[in-house]
Image: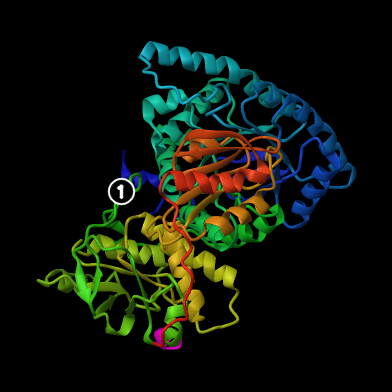
Amino acid sequence: MNHSTFCQGPFSYKRRLTRVVGVGKVGVGGHHPIRVQSMITCDTMDSEACIRQTTELAEAGCEIVRITAPTVKDAQNLRWIKKGLLERGCDVPIVADIHFKPEAAMEAARWVEKVRINPGNYADSKKFAVKQYNDEQYLAELDRIRKRFAPLVLLAKERGISLRIGTNHGSLSDRIMNRYGDTPLGMVESALEFARIARDLGFHAFIFSMKASNPKVMIAAYRLLVARLSEAGPDWNYPVHLGVTEAGDGEDGRIKSAIGIGSLLADGIGDTVRVSLTEDSVHEIPVAQALVAEYNQRPSDDRESSGYDSVLPFDPFTYERRASSQIERNGLGIGGEETVRVLVRQETFDKVAHKLAQMGDFQPEGILESADLIAVDPRDAKALAEINSSTQARFITIRDRIDLPVITAYRLLAAGLDRRHPILLKDTLWPSSDPNREFLKTLLESATNLGALLCDGIGDAILVQGESAPGQSLRLAYNILQAAGARIFKTDYVACPSCGRTLFDLQKTTARIRTATNHLKGVKIAIMGCIVNGPGEMADADFGYVGGAPGKVNLYVGKKAVKFNIPEAEAVDRLVDLIREHGRWINVVSQEAPAAV
């Protein structure tokens, strides 16, 4: 695979130019703005609630609204939801979300502007079966899929509506899992199988997505998809929809979304986005709008510079941390096998020094001014050559206030620097001293820049300087490291957004589980409203809490269900018992009065 094909310009911003796919009145791709979409959370059979939530989303700036249709009956009701919306003057395009039921997709396609299908479960039922397929058997499976999928493609073509071929990491079919494994390659191949069927039938009005709860997996899958489309030829220029599934809520959900979505947008990938938060859907819209705003206004960077011809300093399809030598700074190990460190300026440290004991895990680990750092412009070949000629590993960062985007600057630095030199990442090259700066903007910018570079494998320490409040900047730094999977210092939650398939109140349940377990450092707990992605995403979590039936919960260890049909009122306590059974429980340590510092 040619590493340079994953985006138009890894060292300068160029948006990937795609064909335009219409979703009702909204054009996606081409030179259209990056579109913002979301999904309502109510029961699809409750027409009035669906109309109300859809209207609220449209009024908040949502350009495309998705509604789940788990059964044919739900799909039939989309007719009346659409009719009610039009009668109220709301013509926002509707997407039917389909899992498991081709018959529901066929019915929904009669009433909406777009149908989303999941290749992992459209023609397959997941049984976690282990089976080896020879080529003849595999081709027979593809023929079976064609027979299931072709009628929907032909109906969409006849009606002039579009499709989304939406792969989820958590719901790959057994067939794909057995041939490609639980990998980004498996996600891409799963989608391409369906795309080839659509193309054979002369249908091109489709959009791809590669969603995962792990930003590293998501980023690798989208990059691999774009590279495969690029290599397939210029007429494979289909738009892509971006989303981190099961991002969670609050600051953590926003950070994880910014890492996954923001880093891809920075590489020019993405034509429509959805931020999936375990909150009311209207809260997703301002986050998505803030993420896409810069790129909807940002022209392609066509500047010419010898530095921009550098060899890519990382494998875009496989995560591997950049190998540096370990150095010592004031007794702190940086680089090598050490974890990614958190540095602050002396001014910040002085402001929090009196309350370090009360700050828990959000501790400053090193001070910038005493770290013996060399700050450079990565385009300065002479400065880099001088550093590389040093017999000692040096601690390197980017000079503030240079005219380069953060991601570009650090990729150029990593390309020109010997690997032995550890690198300090900064979230921005323009330190903020504005206490009134909107925190959401800071959070998204910091998470995008630092998260993208960490997922590239670049960085041995980080400095957040876009946020002037000391405690808040430290919290942001650690939460970005956690969301990027660079440093686990607290309980990790994978929580899906609510939708019409959800079998319990996700927001309240997530809050209850957090209250009971948020002291279990390093334990990953998945909270899933239904079985669409639940079992698959369990593979990336230690324990899972999944809706099995109305009012009933199934508990998982890894991807294996071990407790079934537990009444919802008992389920959180039973989850705690399960964690105890597997030796991962620790008791809460009472906080003693902190000693004076």
Q: Is residue 318 left or right of residue 421?
A: right
**Residue drawn at x 48%, y 53% as measured from the top left:** 260
User: In which quarter of the view is residue 217 placed?
Assistant: top left
Q: Is residue 385 above or below residue 112?
A: below
**Res. 244 in view:** no
Q: Nearer the viewer, residue 201 or 241?
A: 241
The percent coordinates of residue 158 (x first, y second) are 70, 23
Q: Residue at x 40, y 78 (%)?
A: 401
- x then y, percent, for residue 287: 62, 60
Q: Amino acid at mark 1?
A: Asp
Q: Residue at x 43, y 79 (%)?
A: 357
Left or right: where 117 falls relative to 313:
right
Residue lying at the far right of the rendered structure: 87
Q: Residue at x 26, y 78 (%)?
A: 373
Task: Name the residue that disc number 1 marks.
Answer: 315
User: Is disc 1 placed on a helix, strand or loop?
Assistant: loop
- Residue 125 appears left or right of 349: right
Residue 343 visible? The answer is yes
Image quarter of the C terminus: bottom left
Residue 224 belongs to the span the image colors magenta:
no
* Residue 28 coordinates in the image, percent (x, y): 62, 44
User: What kind of secondary structure does the magenta stretch mostly adopt?
Assistant: helix
Residue span colored magenta = 347-351
